[in-house]
Amino acid sequence: MRKYFKMNLLKQITLLITVVILISTMLVGVLFSFMIDNLVKKYTGEQALIVAELAAQNEDIINAFDDEDPSFVIQGIAEQIRQTTNADYVTIANLQSIRYSHPNPENIGKPTKTSNEPVFQKGEPIIYSGDGISGPAIKAKTPIFNKQGDIIGVSSVGFLINNVENQIEYYQHKLFLLAIIPLIIGVSGAILIARRVKKLTFGLEPEEISFMFTEREATLESIPEAIITVNTKKKITSINKRARELFYSESLMIDSVITEGRLNDYVDEAIESKRSLTNKKLLIGKDLYVLDASLISENDEMKGIVLTIRPLSEIKQLTNEFSKISEFTENMRAQNHEFLNKLNTIYGLLMLREYDRALKIVSSEVSERQDIITFLITSVKDPLIAACLLGKVNRAKELHVQLTIDTESRLDCVFDEVKSNHFVPLIGNVIENAMEAARFHSGQNSQVKVSFTDLGKDIVFDIEDNGEGIPPELEERIFQTGFTSKKGDNHGLGLAIVKNSLEILNGQIYIDKSELGGARFTIVIPQENLVQ
């Protein structure tokens, strides 16, 4: 069976970066080599022209043209210029192209190998490459003028190609040696980068990372709770299917930023405090959820937050039972607290042999509780509403608030079970707020009065207290999520739940001044939206 060579990520990255750097270095080297070649040739041509013009402007050379033997003077001067400028030859010729000077004295008196006509005709210097008697060279020719401005000869200077190429090869060799340095640095950097990448990926190969990512996405999507991860700038980095469904109306998606609402407040709190949050109430649409925020940390530095959002009831199928159990638990807790206090009082009276007073307390308590239970059983047909009111009576005793239910009140209708689960928290929250307001403002003289009726087409609840009241400018704000005048966590949701329940039941709530001195909340809900 054929075995294929498999290269790990470290070797792949090192090889790839090395190849890229090698190719880049080679391309840059070739480019610079061409540039050096062109620059050296251009510079050599310009240098040849400067030397030619230097010779053409020499007065001794110009004057020597009138001598019987011009080469006697011109040869020495031309050779001196050639040696000074490192030119390969400096040739002076007359209008008939007869040489007056040449590095090889045997060529003096002979015609030049290349034509000088372009210089004589235009009277301008030229630079070109061509073959001469000394071999291929980069040449420059310029006319020689006498004092009257007439052309009397030509100055020709050349640098042999062989010498120029030797100079180019010298520069290219230096360039090659310099190119080795970035190549070595690049290969070393490639190894370091590859090791860094390997460390950041925990030594995993690409296919392993790909599988883990797919596995993570599948796991995240399968979680029934809403999961959202955000970075420290509140930008969403991942969001599962349940969260997308839950925040569909707010268009939350990857790369979007959380900027508004209660969710934004919780994210800000977690980022600023750099600590996890648990069991935070969050109202989404018409339903209440619980939020947990866990920190994502790396090297003791916070990188982001994982938000877990689940229904308050945890199991949606048990929402109805949860509501009943919650009311029952609150009722039992309040009764237990109240009965324990009274039991201690009765025990003390018995120890003091105050039997008549102990009997009077027992009779009073039995009578009072029996009256309340009897009233609720006969006046409120819906058991869930009756249980809620009984729970608030016991809660009022625990808070030392005088809660009075108008004996003329009556609810003969039985509510739809689903709608009842919205109505019970509505009534419960308003009564609870009234007791808190009365207790905070009036202390031991706290009073709350509740009355209700289903006469006509509407169900009407009146809840009054002797608290501070609601200023007109706050009547709308108190129903906003997060608004509260209380201290501590998990406040600012009660009246927001009331508002959402009213929208579901198509009801209304009115705020007025109570005869008790505080606020009066009047809740009006059409019977057709509640009754079975």
Image: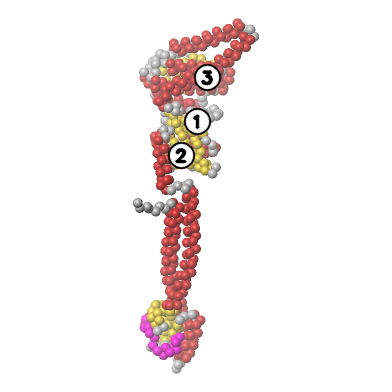
Residue at figure coordinates x 45%, y 33% from the top left: 309
Q: Residues within 10 Å of mark 2 (few under 14, many from 20)?
A: many
Residue 166 image position (x, y, % from top left): 45, 75
Neighbour tally class for label 3: few under 14, some 14-19, many 20 plus, Cα within 10 Å: some
Q: Which mark is residue 333?
A: 3
Q: Earlier in the sequence, mark 1 or mark 3?
A: 1
Tell whether 329 sits left or right of 506: right
Which amino acid type is shown beneath numbered disc 2? Thr
Say which residue appears at 46% left-offset and 74% top-offset. Answer: 167
Along the viewing direction, whichever of 531 and 151 lies nearer the viewer? 531
Helix or strand or loop: what does disc 2 sit on? strand
Residue drawn at 40 percent across, 89 percent down: 110
Q: How much space separates mark 3 and mark 2, taking CA atoms? A: 38 Å
**Is residue 516 in the magenta section?**
no
Cβ–Cβ below 8 Å for labels 1 and 3? Answer: no
Q: What kind of residue is marked 1?
A: Asn
Residue, disc 1: 279
- Is any atom of residue 413 visible in this view? yes
Which quadrant of the view contains residue 287?
top left
Q: Magenta part of the protein: which range?
A: 100-118
- The residue at which mark 2 appears reads as 229
The kind of residue tagged 3 is: Arg
Q: CA distance from mark 1 to mark 3?
A: 21 Å
Q: Is the magenta region chiefly helix, strand or loop?
A: loop
- 107 versus 139 height, above or below: below
Q: Quadrant of residue 452?
A: top left
